[in-house]
Amino acid sequence: QILDYLNLNKNTKLIFQPGTFQIKLGLESLLGIYQNTYLFISNKEEAERILNIDEMDVSALLEKIHDLGPKNVLITDSINGAYFFDGKEKFFMNSLYKKEETIESTGAGDSFSAGFVSAIYFGKNIKEALSWGAINAKEVVSFVGPHDGLLDQKQILQKMESFKDSLILNKIN
């Protein structure tokens, strides 16, 4: 049904963040979804499971997932940061939270994704989008559970100033 909808609505941009159920369906059964995805999002371990790979460098993972068809790929790697690939350039954004400062990590990846996607929706560039994601994730890991600490646009923009020197975006190979 999703593929039918995308074929009828060519201007629709699908953001695909597969969960356990979709990953268990297997790569082949969702290949059409991957090929029609504007933005793919997962954490490193999920990307490795999707590709049936034990362990791989995130830069290589970005390329392998991109080869499946998504136009843009975002892979988070916990306290190690987040990686983005648009088919031409790869970027890395450091994490703002440290393991010893984390109360609970439930929801960190989802809150990163929410911040990133919101920034894209509001027309922000990749650095800003990665920054929104990093700030949102930092706040969520300061609480128990996946909802407390989630920020709205105004709150993220307020925190951007205080984190501007801590957010480092690098191009990677």
Image (cartoon, rainbow, N blue to C red):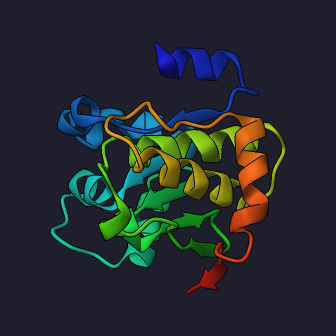
Image point (66%, 74%), residue name: 89
As drawn, is 166 to the left or to the right of 128?
Answer: left
Image point (53%, 73%), residue name: 94
Q: Nearer the viewer, residue 127 or 63?
A: 127
- Taking the view exactly as shown, the residue that stands out farthest to the right is 123
Task: Name the spot of residue 105 as percent of width and height, x first.
Answer: 31, 50
Task: Name the spot of residue 157 as percent of width and height, x first.
Answer: 78, 48
As drawn, is 143 to the left or to the right of 156?
Answer: left
As drawn, is 37 to the left or to the right of 21?
Answer: right
Q: Quadrant of residue 123?
A: top right
Label total for image:
0
Q: Is residue 3 visible?
A: yes
Q: Nearer the viewer, residue 1 or 38?
A: 38
Image point (67%, 72%), residue name: 88
Q: Quadrant of residue 48?
A: bottom left
Give the position of the C terminus as an image quadrant. bottom right
Give the vertical position of 92 relative to 65 (above or below).
below
Q: Nearer the viewer, residue 28 or 90?
A: 90
Q: Is residue 40 visible?
A: no
Task: Name the spot of residue 107 as percent of width and height, x first.
Answer: 37, 41
